[in-house]
Image: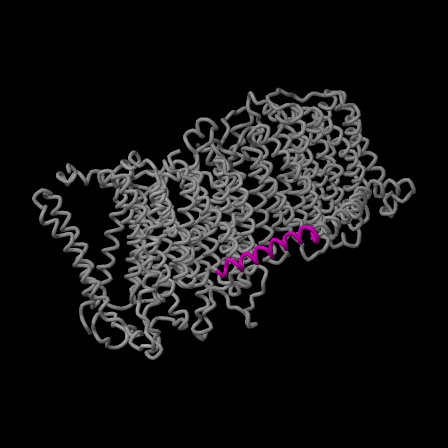
Amino acid sequence: MSAVANGFAALDGIEILAVDGLLAVSALGLLLVDVAMPAGNKRVIGYGALLLLGLAFAATFTLDLTGTALSGAYVGDGFAIWCKRIFIGAGFFGVLGGLDSTARIGPRRQGEYYQLLLMSVLGMTLLAGARDLILLMVSFELMSLPLYAMAAWGGIGNYPEQKGPIPGMTMPSKRRWHRPAEAGLKLYLVGAVSTVVALYGISLVFGLGGSTRFAVLATTLTGGPLLTLAVAMIVAGFAFKIGAAPFHMWVPDTYEGASTPFVAFLSVAPKAAGFAALVQLLLGPLAGMAATWTTLVVVLIVVSLLVGNLMAVPQQNIKRMLGFSGVAQMGFGLMALLAAGSVTAHDVASRGVRPEGLATLLFFLAAYMVANMGAFFTVEAVAAAGYTPGKPADERDDDDTLPTFAGLHSRSPALALAGLLFVLSLGGIPFAVGFWAKVWVLLSLWAAGFGWLVVMAAALSAAGLFYYLQVARSMYMKAPVGADGTTLPAVKVGGGLLLAIVLLALLTMGVGLFPGPVMEAARIAAGL
Amino acid sequence: MTHDLLALLALLSPLVAAVVLFIIAPLRVRGAVSAALTIGATSVSLVASVLLAAARMFGATAPNVDLQLAWLPGGAQTLATVGVYVDPVAAPMMVVVALVALCVQVYSVGYLGHEPSRDRGRYFAYHALFAFSMLGLVMAPNLLQLFVCWELVGLASYLLIGYYWTKPSAGQAALKAFWVTKFADMGLMLGLMVLYVKTGGFDWNVPVGQALMTADAETIAGLFFLAVVGKSAQFPMHIWLPDAMEGPTPVSALLHAATMVAAGVYLIVRAYPIFMLAPTVLTVMVYLGAFTALFAAVVAVFQDDIKKVLAFSTCSQLGYMVAALGTGSMVSGYFHLTTHAFFKALLFLTAGSLIHAVHSNSLHDMGGLWAKMKPTGILLIIGSLALAGFPMTAGFFSKDLILEELLHAGHYLPLGAAILAAGLTAFYMTRVVMLSLFGAPSEAAEHAHESPAVMLAPMVLLAVLALAGGLLHGDFARMAGVEAAFHVTPVGVVATLVGFSGIGLGLWRFSPGRRTAIGTQWVSAPMRLLTWLTASKPVDVFFAGFYRQAMLRAAAGIAWFDRYIIDALINLSGWAVLRGAERFRELQTGQPTDYVYAVVGGLIVLTAMGVFTA
Amino acid sequence: MTQQWLPAFAYLAIAASASAIMIIAGLILRVKAKVDEPSKYDTYECGEEPDGNTWIRFHPRYYVVALVFVLFDAEAAFVLPWALNLRELGQFAILEMFLFLAVLMVGWLYAVRKGAIQWQ
């Protein structure tokens, strides 16, 4: 009880939580600003959120965030800082690309949206360095709860048929109006079940290990049937958050229903957070159970690769397609985790294997974030062009489908080029950043001794090229003619969305051409 | 430090110009803006190159510039780097590239003055791309970057040959050049792979203690040489070069005479440590080079198109360089590359000036232009003398050096071929001069007028270098660590005499009095046979036959296999994927309860797996 | 392995059979109505005559009020133990509680401002 008796000792090293503190103050501050502001279009709050996220991102580079805080419950290391950059970066791009969409969906309620997003990012950044079961779980829930609300963003409430459209808002059709509610509900229901499962697993770990601190658990956990059960529950619970099959069922429906810029955020940041949690637990106190959890992860990988790649093929809605492709991508992320977990000190000593798994995971997550967000923003740009004022509302339901991309090359050459870059990166074609990520993951997995899995993954991602290139084909080889024979309009992109797409495209191509420095940084972040 | 900056400036300023022009269409469609940007960027490169070279030649010994950025990391070490590397070998080539590029770009302003603005913009954007790629090739710190730039240079060549894209022949020529050099490039790629496997890197300097086995070196050098044969238009892959004359004449001067075709020779110079370990390849180089020198010189005699004469002449001179490098003397081949760049670029530009005046490539449409175009005429004569190896011109020194080396290495047969080719060179250049400048003016020549100053000025600069460039031979020798002073030797005297007799024969044969009905003068029966044999027709015919008989049939077979076996397999797997997807799709019901069941089901499966592995 | 897992499987078996026995016993022992009784399909309300359907619409206002209530209920759950142990915890705990309450106040301010506790 000495830590309690001298309460101020708990503050030792608190400065490494500076970025998290900034995010917390930002979230609360924006809420107060929102409350204090007169009703109306609150677009300015979005700019504030953007500025604060940019500041936080810069702070991860300028401040020294390494150390231990909260009496050992929180550790800032290279891994945590790298993850923070991914989370804050995803939040930044999520806000930047969503400025217009958010203002369009709910001009008077933007404050809540950005506040929720900041809260979610705060949960993630805390998660990245959590070394305590309670902190891990609390920050995990702090991340998840805002996401449920954000997924349903704009879908709650009656369709304003009688009252007429809300001023300053372009009305979607009735069907589309309610789709976010469905998206949020499905995310919430499945998420709640998964959280319960993970929480039960964690409570078992606590019961067996007698502590919530990872450092203690690493020595007290000895195995046994109950711990096996706990590991299975933890893996299952977090597999939901990263959307690995068979816990992926919410992914396509949520992606399809929720607003696209939010999906761009949802499809990368919480997944990276899920991986961060898995890494903290499985490579930390549960490292001794590697023999068990690697088997489970192999099952998840195989099912994810199969389900993701196969299901993505027949999809006509690009957001659903990207959802399933994301499931397959998570298979790759899990492969990096598997490589990290199965290379033992013995392998390193006797076979000269390099323990690169964790570094490949970090690089993969960054590459996936850049390309996937870019792909969703491209979808948003094309779909937003469908919101032409004169177009009847009920014709706008299929704005995210493949046919709307027909002939994008001639309608907006630059956007088509950026979109091509993103799908090529996701498909793992050189020289986009995704190529290096996949190659590096496969190499490290090969070194870890999972040759058959490498072969299978390579074959399935070759099959995956089919659906990625279908988008490219639609953009470049089809005439810009809609299903009804009308010529599709030119796509004008502007503002934050344009900036986000340009930045992400530059990152995709730049790091794709010069992967060296970033890979080196990932290696250092992973402590190699 | 300043040198690092200079090197980066030299490389990146054309890149910036190219990127700006390719991305910002409004700038590109304005010919004048595009030209100004490109010429400005190339000027920056030239100034930087000259400063860098001056600090490394004429006895000065500045340390090498070596800036490298990790590009592909692989495991613990870096697989490949990109960067800039300036040593005494790269520096003079940088100057040559930047100087000739600048001359040609300035010249193009006048030469293409009547073209639509949009087309000129495109033209200069390609030029900027070329300047960047070629400088990147010259300054490459390793062979991988050299290869990347090698391909970029090929792309620029393809784009520039096809500049007159509305002409079908230009399109075909561009394609032919692309495919022939691309085929040869496979040699470079395979060579790089072997090099990587054997040494674990892409350096031309094989690390100490990792000496290449001779057999490996032979393989690598042999594969590299295949690429050289294609790029530097050596027999039998020279066929693309005459066709490439479809491009605008300044392009021929820059790419297909001075710099790009010399990239092959430069590759040998750069990878010389590897080539030195491969004696067989070196011997092949001597013989193939000497044969190309003679063969192309013979063919050049029979060309009526002034640009074709110069194209075959380029093949011939590149043959000299390759042969010289084959003797184990880097200096002689490299020096000839430099001097040749100056006088051949000059010749192409003067030819362009003549073509500009009469609107025809044919020597028959020229004649008597001396009266109308004295400055161009003088420049053409200077270039011809330098090419013919007239004493004290640049070509004299460099050619003499090559012949010396052939003699010292004891390659007497190639030496004979080279001396004979020197005589032929003097002969066909005299022919060009006599036919185009003297005699009765043709109809077109009546209306000829001198080119504007913007075209003449670059030519004058090149002419000065063509005359005085030979004085640099001592510096080139020092660069390779040899002291060399020019001295009169028997072989030099013989070659000079042969050259004089070639000039004399040409003067007599094509004197204005004897040159009635020139075009039909070659028609005596043995001459006709020789014409047919040498006009590179047999090689073209052979390639065409090979293409029709062997490649098309093989392709048909492959196509059958592809259609009925591969496609069937792909369709089958596609069908299987779709069917599988349909099955899986039924699981995605859209009912949240089912999703929760899936979570629970997955949990049970995972737990069971955990139990069984525990 | 089997040894280890025996208790778990035994427990599962007992749990499954207990449920099965209850259901089967219910099937056997229950009173079966001869005629279809409409009250069988009524909404179950403990000892009361049901009044209307369960599937009625509640005003979402109830939900918001409940949420605000939970906010302060949870607060109390933290504040009470804190107050009891304040003497041992010292100054740091006072600071921490004020921080906690400040964050809570932001939420409360938001709720008030959004009209969560106004009925109309």
Q: Nearer the viewer, residue B471 or B475?
A: B475
Q: Up-down: is B212 above or below B516?
A: above
Q: Quadrant of the C terminus of chain A?
A: top left
Q: Is residue B159 left or right of residue A516?
A: right
Residue range in magenta is B562-586
Toward which corner of the image does residue A181 lie, by quadrant? bottom left
Q: Up-down: is A3 above or below B249?
A: above
Q: Residue at x 41, y 63 (%)?
A: B591
Q: Nearer the viewer, residue B465 or B595?
A: B595
Q: Up-down: is A115 above or below A388?
A: above
- Assess whether residue B565 is covered by the magenta stretch: yes
Residue B359 rendering spot, x and y as whole percentages = 73, 53
Count of marks placed on residues: 0
Residue B471 rendering spot, x and y as whole percentages = 63, 28
Residue lying furthest front in this view? Answer: C29
Secondary structure mostly seen in the magenta stretch: helix
